[in-house]
Amino acid sequence: MGRMIPFLAKRWFLLVLVLGVLTAWLWPAGLGWTRLVPPRLVMALALFLSAWTLDSARLYAACRNPWPALWAVAISYLLLPALGWLTGGLAPLADFRIGLMICACVPCTLASAVLWTRMAGGDEATALLSTFISTALGWLATASWLSWTTGSQIQLDTLSMMRELALILLLPVVVGQLARAPAPLRWTATRFRAGIGVVSRLLILVIMLRTALEVLGQLEHALARLGVGLLLFMAVLCVGNHLAALYFGWWSSARLGFSREAAIAVAFSGSQKTLPVSLVLWESYFRDYPLAVAPLLFYHAGQLIVDTVIADQWSADGPREDKGETDQAAAASGNEATAPSAEDGR
């Protein structure tokens, strides 16, 4: 029992997610209420909470050595979209190709990258800075990649997409940081950071369950035509792209002379992607490709599962003096946003 409590504290989100997906499969009516939740509002609120609990001083400290964070952003916005485009050529349906590109082009999640970096004994400040930069550039990088790679399949209003992404990505972060200016609000954000993080993760969980409901609803009509093998193949492609970016970040960081802690941060923040932004883009611009939503769920759920195993392994392989502190911090937080962040999976 003594070991079970820390395990549940670190894994509660994954356990609830699995139960939610099973509910969506066996009793979809039980999750029908998630269709009434507006993704834009949920994402904006989650980003606001992330930014409100994000200590600006830690970002400034990471800026003294920004190269690992910038390298993670380069992996996120150059390598992963390229992998999505290349592996999309293996997908037999345009829906899956578009879904691969959407989840490859969106920003890094503000939440899980920081928590998984902490669990693995990495540099949280680097993860914070890279996810912050990724979010700030999302309006430009995401819209540009999707315009270039899907423009021949669908007519996109690129400027409209840029404006929408700027509004839903930048505005909540700016407002959240401004909310830290008054001392009472800053104290509240710091004092109740753990609880705020739980709320933020629950908001993201709602988005994930809504996505699972959408995926299962679409697959109900297409499963006989597509077959289980094709869906498993797409899941492997999604997780494979994530792992390729993660291990490239780890390997290349060592070659560039970054510390082990910074390399861990690069690996996670360079490979993890946010689900709420992906879902908003699919609903706004790619509804004519209903099965494109499947790779979004495969990628996001896959990254949470495999990164948990990897973080545990890296933590076990790390310096012994850091392990107790890392395990204690991860168990105490039990959520992505307990660090000065909170999403992605966002």
Image (tube, rainbow, N blue to C red):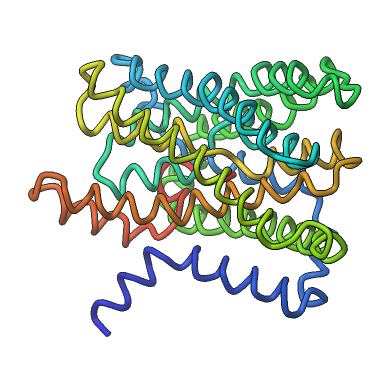
Q: Position of residue 146 (x, y in %)?
A: 74, 23
Q: Position of residue 178 (x, y in %)?
A: 57, 28
Whether 283 is drawn above or below 4: the answer is above
Left or right: 31, with 254 as reference point:
right
Q: Position of residue 119 (x, y in %)?
A: 30, 50
For the point 56% across and 69% down, the residue is: 18
Whether 41 is drawn above or below 138: the answer is below
Whether 329 is drawn above or below 185: the answer is below
For the point 79% across and 58% down, the residue is: 214
Q: Position of residue 108 (x, y in %)?
A: 54, 34
Quarter of the image for residue 70 reads top left
Left or right: 9, with 320 as reference point:
right
Front residue of this view, candidates 312 and 45: 312
Q: Is residue 49 something one can see in this rendering?
A: yes
Front residue of this view, candidates 14 and 61: 14
For the point 30% across and 70% down, the residue is: 6
For the point 71% across and 16% down, the residue is: 144
